[in-house]
Amino acid sequence: MAARKINNKDSRHYGGDELNERKRKVLWAVVQDYADTAEPVGSRTIAKKYNLGVSSATIRNEMQDLEDEGYLEQPHTSAGRIPSIKGYRFYVDWLMQPAPVSNEEKSMIDSMLLDHVTKVDEIFRNMARAVASLTHNLSVATSAGVKKKFNYIRFLPLDGVRAILLVVSDQGDVSNAVVDIPRGSSFDEMQLLADRLNHFLHNRDIDSMDENTILSFQKDVEKDLSPYVHVFKALERALTPPKEVYSGGASQLIEQPEFKSVEKVQDILNLLEQRDMLESMLLSSSDQPIAVHIGTENSVKSLSDLSIIRAQFSSNGRIIGSVAVLGPTRMQYSKVIGMMRFMQQRLDALLKNKDS
C-alpha cells in the first residue's frame, strides 16, 4: 500500500488543544489502519504506510503517550495498539472529515429515493437496505409518518354481535378492527356514536389524539358510555398503529471479526427483536442532524460493543424519519457520515421539489 501523506494544509483547525499536531496525526493513522485491518497497529506499520515525516521510534513514543493519556489501548496478546472509546471520540469530533460519495453510490441512493416510491415509509425501508449494502454494517430505519388528520370513522355490520370499525384519515389511509356490539345496544346506536365521534374529532391531528381525547369526548356526550370502553380502546389502537422498523445488513455485520462468536451473533439477533427500543433510539429528539454514539457511550447495555451513527431527516421543521448504522467501534466513520449527509441533502431537495 502506498504511503499516505497527511498535509498540514489539509488539517482542520481543531477546537481542543489536548493533543499536539503530531499526536493527532498518529492517532488518525492508528484509527484508519485499525478500521481497514481489524489488527492492532504497531509503530513500524504507521511509519511504512503513512508518511508522517518522523521515525518509527518517534511514532512509538507518541503511541505510548497516547496510551498513557487514554486515547489508545494495548490488547494483552499483541504489541500493537488499538483506539479506545476516548480515542475514537477525539477522532470523530476533531480529526475526521466526511468522505465524498462516489458516483456509483450516488446513483444507488438516487434510485432508492426516486424509483417507484410513493410513500415516505417506502423511502426509509429502501434506505435501510441501501445503507447496509454500501457500508457492510447493520442498518435500521423508521418513518415518523406523514402528519395526518382525522376524517371519519364508520361501523360495518359483521354479524349479529360484532361490527367492523373503520378509521379513515384525510389522506385516505384506513385502519380497521373488529369490535363486539355491547349487550343492550344495537348497530344503529353504534352508528349514532360514530356520528358524534366524527363531529367531535373531525380534522384533528391524529398524532395528538390519545386516551385523554377519548375521555374528553365521553364528558362532552354526558352519557354513560362504559359499555363502549372496548370500542374506544380499539379506536385508540387504530389511531396509533405501531411504527415499522426496517433493517438490513445483519448477515454482513456478523461476518465482521468482532462478531464471530455465537454469543455476539445472538446478541445482534436479540437486538433486532427489540423493536420498541430501536424505534425509541431512532426517533428520540436530538439537536444534531447526525449523531455518533461510540461503544459504552450508548446507554443501552446491549449496544455497548457497537458504534451507532444516526441521521434524522426533517421536512418543514418536523422529523419524518431516521436511519442508523450499527457496526463495530472501528467502523468507517467518515464513509458512513459522508453518505448520511448526502442522503439528507438528496431527500431534502426531493421533498422541496414535491412541495413546490
Image (tube, rainbow, N blue to C red):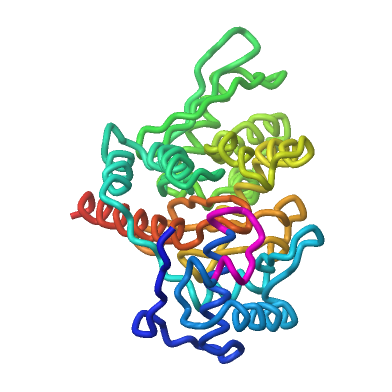
From the top left corner, tell me how far across and down residue 55 is, in percent. 55, 81
Which quadrant: the C terminus? bottom left
341 or 92: nearer the eye? 92
Q: Which of the two residues, 130 or 36, is positioned nearer the viewer here?
A: 36
Does 310 sit above or below residue 84?
above
Q: Give the side of residue 99 with respect to residue 333, left or right.
A: left
From this view, report whether residue 340 is shown above or below residue 148.
below
Residue that appears at 55% across and 40% down: 245
Establish if 221 lies above or below 179: below
Q: Residue at x 66, y 35 (%)?
A: 233
Q: Residue at x 59, y 60 (%)?
A: 34
* Relative image position of residue 12 (x, y in whole percent): 41, 83
User: Residue placed farthest to the left in the image?
Assistant: 356
Compare residues 22 and 316 and report the one nearer the observer. Answer: 22
Residue 204 or residue 131, whichever sits in front: 131
Quarter of the rendering containing residue 161? top right
Image coordinates of residue 248 in percent, x first then y, are 52, 37
Specify whether residue 92 is in view: no
Give the side of residue 307 with respect to residue 117, left or right.
right
- Residue 273 as seen in the image, left or right of residue 32: right
Q: Is residue 5 shown to the viewer in this render?
A: yes
The residue at 41%/56% (across/down) is: 340
> Image quadrant for the N terminus?
bottom left
242 vs 84: above or below: above
Q: Which residues are magenta?
A: 35-46
Q: Farthest residue in the top direction? A: 159
Give residue 120's quadrant in the image.
top left
How far across and down, in percent of the image, does residue 49 sit?
A: 48, 66
